[in-house]
Amino acid sequence: MVALPERAPPRPSRRAGAALSRIALCTDASALLSPAAAAELEVEVVAIPVALGGEPFTGSADDFYERMRVGAVATTSQPSPGEFLEAYERLASGDAGSVLSLHLDRRVSGVSESAAIAAHDATLPIRVVSLPTVSYGVGLCVRAARAALRGGASVTQAATEAERIATSLDNVFVARAAPGSRVQGMDGWALLRFAGGGAEPVSAHETLENATQAMTQRILGGRPGLVAVGHAATELEAAADRLAHDLVGASVAVVERYRVAPSVGAHTGPDSFGAFWWPAA
């Protein structure tokens, strides 16, 4: 776990006399939590600004990938410290006494740095943590932190649990090069893995079917207890569904599905799907 150091003591809370004890959670949209999941986990989600063709994009994922497929270049930027401060103050205006703010690997994005800057101006204590994972891996860590907090954990204990999950996670994803994406230099379908702060190539395949088979073998070789499978464009949904079905058939205990939103798909391209998992206990 990388906990960003405080640059100055936080200002006293406007509600110092109130009996506030709830530990709130915050993350960013790259964690790929659906609105329903975010509500169930009681987590504040800060948006990741996405641009398509140089213009801010706020439409549907389907429209985003359709436009990207025909050549529109997608980019993302980190939320500003002001946007994080607004999120923290919304939590402060409720019954939160402190906030655990969990974000993707700082080696990939400056999101956690923006959060840390905002933390110094917040009116309640903020613990900002950069986790060694990305995408839905962060979402799984948020889930683990919430479970810990509901069990009575402190901020430190919940952060430690999120870090434990992050370091135990493995991942693999399939993608093809697309304009503006970070998947470049590999022909056909690339099998990649996020590790050490970047996407490293695993193998290359001529067909999606072959790439999916290689993905299945790699996941099952990790003896997973839970696997989360996500897809970007709708054209990849059936392949992701087949992967999930095959994993269930191979007796993986828990298999769940998620959608790769533009905040992540801008970097992996429309033709991508993948999985996060951790070993069975």
Image: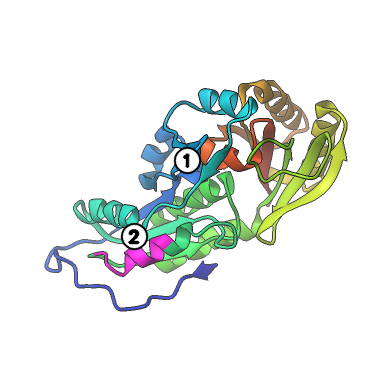
Amino acid type at circle 1 is Val
| Nearer to us in this view, 263 or 11 | 263
| Nearer to us in this view, 188 or 129 | 188
Query: Which mark is nearer the camera, 1 or 2?
Result: 1
Which residue is at 46% across, 35% downward? 34
Query: Where residue 241 sits in the image (x, y, percent)?
Result: 68, 24
Q: Which residue carries the number 2 mark? A: 99
Which residue is at 54% across, 50% downward? 138
Q: Which residue carries the number 1 mark? A: 50
**Quarter where residue 35 is shown:** top left
Numbered circle sitting on residue 110: none
Amino acid type at circle 2 is Val
> Left or right of 222: which side holds 70?
left
Give the structural element (helix, strand or loop) at label 2: strand
In the image, residue 125 sits, relative to residue 105, either above or below, namely below
Distance between the alpha carbons at the discs numbered 1 and 2: 26 Å
Tag 1 and tag 2, C-beta contact below 8 Å: no
Q: Main secondary structure of the magenta part?
A: helix
Which residue is at 56% across, 38% downward? 74
Q: Is residue 154 magenta?
A: no
Q: Residue furthest left?
A: 17
Query: Where residue 218 sits in the image (x, y, percent)?
Result: 81, 43
Which residue is at 51% across, 62% downward? 130
Q: Which residues are magenta?
A: 114-122
Query: Where residue 171 sits in the image (x, y, percent)?
Result: 70, 47
Give the structural element (helix, strand or loop) at label 1: strand
Q: Is residue 112 visible?
A: yes
Q: Residue furthest bottom?
A: 8
In the image, residue 209 sits, relative to residue 216, either above or below, namely above
> Left or right of 143: which side holds 250?
right
